[in-house]
Image (cartoon, rainbow, N blue to C red):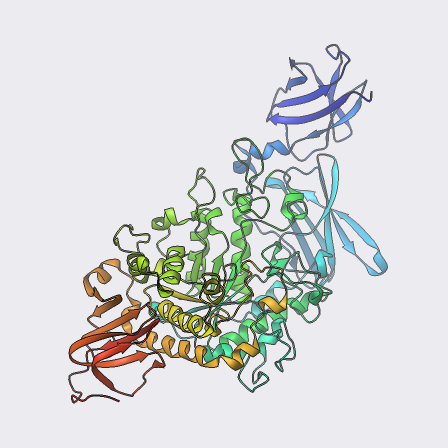
Amino acid sequence: MKDTFVSARLVAPNQIRVLLVSPASWEKERFWLEVDHQSEIALHSRKIEGDYLDFTLPSPLALGHSYFVYTPSLGNIPLDVSEATTFPDFDENYTYHGRLGPEYSPEETTWRVWAPLASSVSLVVHQKRGREVLYPLRRFAHGTWILTLKGNFLHTAYHFRVTNNEVVTDTLDPYAKSSLANLGASVVMDERKILAEAPHASLPSLSFGQMVLYEGNVRDLTVDSSSDIVCKGLYLGLTESGRKTFKGNAFGLDYLRSLGVTHLQLQPLQDFGSVDEMKPFSQYNWGYDPMQYFVPEGSYATKPNDPESRVQEAQAMIRVLHEAGIRVVLDVVYNHVYRPARFAMAQLVPNYCFRHTHDGKLSSYSGCGDDLDSNRPMVRRLIEDSAKWWIDAYGVDGFRFDLMGLIDTKTIEDIRHYGKAKNSDFLCYGEGWEMAPDGQEKMANMAHASLLPHVGFFNDRFRDAVRAYCAGDLGERDHFIYAMLGSANDWADQKALFSSVAQSINYIECHDNATYYDWLRKRGITSEAERLSIVKFGMASVLFSFGIPFLHAGQELGQTKFGNENSYNLGDLVNKLSTKMLDTRLEIAQYGVSALRLRQKLSFFAWQDPKTLADRVDILSFGDGLLIRVKGDNGLDSDAVDFLFNPTASALTYAYPDDRWILFDGGGACDGARLLGRNVIIPKHSLLITAVPPSHWPSSHGR
């Protein structure tokens, strides 16, 4: 029978298709359906289409049983029922709303897992010296399998053994809250204890205009060998205060505090698969390749194989950041996973988790592997339950959604609503690129920004326009104005992108873009001094824009990644926050700090209504320079504030009819200096900010 190929598949609720490729004739062959290795059902009604034999059953086939198609000439043929996940009533019949994952108490533990296609599921308990003990689970409604064992199973390592389509697979628990290193096993945790120790912030409420985001990586922010941080590259490294660079400047936690940023956006903390957790410094990866959505990454823990270490130390890091006045935004990757074939939910429920194109192929719009399908109710539930766990157990203050345009709007809004109910300052934003065609539900991309009025979007138009204009491209003037006003009003050839200024995340560099310093070098700006002056100018433009300013770690130092853009696996030398740069270019960071502090004093940066900006902002030109005037209340007892931008390589002068109060120049904010002038000079590639002096000031000139 070497030239014969046969397979059997459930293709409709009551239809079995047998593919039989053979030189022999099978028209007179008899077929049965064997159920649970016991009973047999004769398959009489058949339709022959080429190599296909279709059998119609008298009623829909019930899932959760072992099925073989039997014929005397070929024996048992496993029936593949995974197509059932696409049947019209599958989601209605099998969506489960009850608890999932292990529920621990000292007296007993109950395991619940969702596996509606499976014919059997067993709990495999790991014991000493490699021994395993199996306990079968019982099937209940909606495809759930449940087992309760008496006794204390705290920190017990386990996995599931599931049989789908007569194939036996060992898999982790997708709802486990911790694990052994390198996906070695899921571990039973005391969830009540974890929740009781959650580092919830007691920080004062922020106004929208005060928010400044800073993107970093647990490893990058602390790993430089020239500092005295003890737990370099680990969660606990960001809990150490009083740490210094070689020249005695603040580093780590104290450096972040000194910047005055309100939010630290941390690259993924959810357990990822590309780094050996037992040898974390032998490899490097940002972590945009998740495998366990509820479990903190082990390579950042002091004891990766201790299931408590990663949980407690991640909590400790966030708690200390909160105590330092810094909110934590978690970068989450809910659009794809590291290895789809090893993803626990995909192993438990074949053919369910991932999106398909119209021709039936698995889609990879992310470019990183099979796309998770958030429109499937149980995938959406996994995503939402995971997000809620990070809010409740780790006290995160927001989410940055990687490739958010591959997630549906309902999922994003559900998470935002839950977070907002817990924390009035909760933030949700992400990459809203249009990457996939819409299905039955709208995707969370910028084309649908109006459907998500309280969700932010990375504004790539801002990035492109501000980078170019600050480097001297005067042709980008109108695009620069459009970007600086939050892309929420029509301007020149561009239509409003957002319904609220608050939706615009304003940036000129982030982790997977070239640093601005490298971008300028690639553009041909060879002078180091000129590059750094433009870096300062670009940073000031971000910080004095309408929207939410976003800075990438090291941007405030003009740091290089040696020309690499997507340096996700290029190691510490390329990616670390450099103490050498901090020691030699600290004045650039201090310039950024003074800009940030002035921004937070200017109350009009809290404006979110595009109409308010249209009514209260004037745009003027002076030579090749640009003046953006903001009129009305500003928190300074002044009638108007002017932002004078000089993108050219020569100094520009602007003449006022009366004295103006100089708030900010090339050296930073002029705090309390009461600088007055009429003919003001704006040095090349720089920003000058002036205001109408308060009426109670005496008129005078100079410094």
User: Could you tell me residue 321's position as x and y percent?
Assistant: 52, 75
Q: Closer to the camera, 573 or 157?
A: 573
For this orientation, the residue located farthest to the left is 657
The quarter of the displayed image where residue 106 is located: bottom right
Q: Quadrant of the N terminus?
A: top right
Q: Is residue 370 left or right of residue 454?
A: right
The image quadrant where one finds the C terminus is bottom left
Tell me, yes or no, if residue 625 can be seen here: yes
In the rendered image, the residue lying farthest to the right is 129
Q: Quadrant of residue 465?
A: bottom left
In the displayed structure, would residue 59 be above or below residue 360? above
Is 309 located above or below residue 345 in the figure? below
Q: Is residue 254 visible?
A: no
In which quarter of the view is residue 596 placed? bottom left
Residue drawn 69% across the image and 57% down it: 109
The x and y percentages for residue 512 are: 52, 59
Q: Nearer the viewer, residue 235 or 561?
A: 561
- Position of 463 with respect to 390 (left or right) is left
- Residue 641: x percent and y percent? 23, 73
Q: Is residue 370 above or below residue 102?
A: above
Q: Residue at x 47, y 51 (%)?
A: 404
Q: Indicate the position of residue 276 as horizontal and vertical percent values.
A: 71, 61
**How many numbered discs?**
0
Q: Is residue 399 above or below residue 5?
A: below
Q: Residue at x 81, y 53 (%)?
A: 132
